[in-house]
Every structure is written in structure tokens, then in C-alpha cells.
Image (spheres, rainbow, N blue to C red):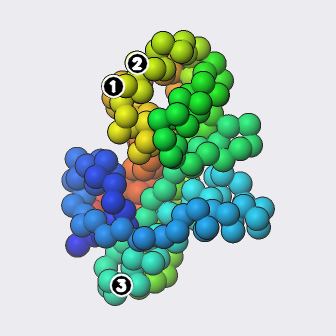
């Protein structure tokens, strides 16, 4: 069965295809800032926002592809009740890493399936990220070497790269940290006979 990933994320595509799930990318072009702001004004927490974003992306793209199963995914980062988005500049990324230094934040990764504009299934998973004490010199060097990760990932890091050096402990599923609760998604695709069981 042809599957669509409602995303521009080559990282999520790579995760899926490495697990034997071939997808075509079709971004949802959702105004995430406005959508998130509306959810927060309605009382949604960071976990609910991740799940809602994933669902909305899947539904929007599925309405353009009747009959095709669409996967939506998104991730939010929360520290002490504050929701953070991707840094807009390296200076903002530096300030963010200084804030995270020596503390804990949570990554909430949502994933959803939709077809014909209707949400069929969604879930969210959380990973707890314990950042070690980071020196200013380390942060500067890290940002010099990892500018793409610093500006493209919500936390300013890719755990599968040098970002692993930011942490002294990670609690939760590796795929959740990468932004896709892969194991629950694979189970749901098997339950729907999209993948062999």
C-alpha cells in the first residue's frame, strides 16, 4: 500500500524506510505557530499539542489524497511548563542550550494516521532528557559544528549525532527522541494489515 508522510522531514522518512515502510513526502503546510497558539489558548499542554499537530497534518494531507493512508508526526519540547519551538537564530539556540544546561526537559512526539480527511488513530509518547552541565566553550564549539541541527531541531540537537554529548541521561524511546513514535506506529500499521503481522 502506498503511504504518504505529511512532512518535509527526511529524518522521519529515513526512519520509516529503514524499518521497511516506504513513504512519499507531502508537507501539510500548516501554520504551526498559529495552530499551536490556538491550542494553548484553549488549555492544551505540550503533550496534547504534539498529538494535535500530528493529527492535523495527517488530516490536511489526506484530504488531498482520497483513499491513501497518511502519516502525520510532530514533536514539542517542554521545560518547566514552557513550550519551546525551533530556535530562529544561532544566538537563540545558544541561549536555549544555556537554559537547558544542568536541567531536564521533555520531548513529546505525536504520530497519527488519517484517510480521506478523517483522523483514524493517533498517539503521543514522551522522552525525558537530562542535559549535563554545559560550559560556554562547549556550547560555542557545538554550535559552530552543528548549525543545521541547532536550527532545524526543536531542542537544537540531533541525538543521533554530536547532540548525544549534551546529555547525561535519556529516559524513553529512542525513536520518540528522534520525533517519531515508531513502534506504536508499526503496530498500528500491522493491525490495519498495511504491514505483515
Q: CA distance from mark 2 to mark 1?
A: 6 Å
Contact flag, marks 3 and 2 (Cβ < 8 Å): no
Q: What is the secondary structure assignment of the residue under circle 3?
A: loop
State whether residue 93 appears in this view: yes
Could you tell me which residue is drawn at 59 percent across and 14 percent down? 133
Mark 2 Cα-neighbour bin, 10 Å: few <14, some 14–19, many ≥20: few
Residue that mark 2 sits on: 141
Image marks 3 and 1: residues in contact by CB distance under 8 Å: no
* Looking at the image, residue 140 lies above or below residue 64: above
The disc label shown at residue 168, or none: none
Residue shown at 74%/43% (left/top)? 81
Tag 2 secondary structure? helix
- First along the sequence among labels 3 and 1: 3
Where does residue 124 sit, x and y in percent of width and height?
A: 56, 54
Q: Quadrant of residue 101?
A: top right
The answer to whether marks 2 and 1 mark residues whose Cβ atoms lie closer than 8 Å is: yes
How packed mark 3 is, by other alpha carbons closer than 10 Å (few <14, some 14-19, many 20 or more), is: some
Task: Give the secondary structure at mark 1.
Answer: helix
Q: Earlier in the sequence, mark 3 or mark 2?
A: 3
Instruction: Give the vertical position of 156 relative to 119 (above or below).
Output: above
Label total for image: 3
The disc label shown at residue 145, or none: 1
Question: Which residue is identified by label 3?
Answer: 64
Amino acid at each position: 500500500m502506498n503511504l504518504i508522510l505529511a512532512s518535509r522531514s527526511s529524518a522521519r522518512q529515513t526512519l520509516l524506510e529503514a524499518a521497511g515502510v516506504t513513504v512519499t513526502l507531502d508537507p501539510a503546510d500548516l501554520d504551526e505557530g498559529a495552530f499551536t497558539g490556538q491550542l494553548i489558548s484553549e488549555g492544551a499542554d505540550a503533550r496534547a499539542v504534539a498529538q494535535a499537530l500530528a493529527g492535523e497534518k495527517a488530516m490536511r494531507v489526506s484530504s488531498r489524497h482520497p483513499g491513501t493512508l497518511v502519516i502525520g508526526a510532530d514533536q514539542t519540547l517542554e521545560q518547566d511548563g514552557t513550550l519551546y519551538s525551533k530556535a530562529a537564530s544561532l544566538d537563540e539556540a545558544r541561549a536555549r542550550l544555556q537554559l537547558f544546561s544542568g536541567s531536564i526537559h521533555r520531548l513529546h512526539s505525536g504520530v497519527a494516521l488519517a484517510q480521506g480527511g478523517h483522523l483514524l488513530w493517533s498517539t503521543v509518547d514522551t522522552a525525558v532528557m537530562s542535559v549535563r552541565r554545559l560550559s560556554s566553550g562547549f556550547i560555542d564549539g557545538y554550535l559552530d559544528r552543528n548549525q543545521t541541527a541547532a536550527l532545524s531541531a526543536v531542542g537544537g540537537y540531533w541525538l543521533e549525532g554530536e547532540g548525544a554529548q549534551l546529555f547525561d541521561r535519556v529516559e524513553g524511546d529512542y525513536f520518540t527522541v528522534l520525533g517519531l513514535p515508531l513502534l506504536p506506529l508499526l503496530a498500528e500499521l500491522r493491525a490495519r494489515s498495511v504491514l505483515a503481522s
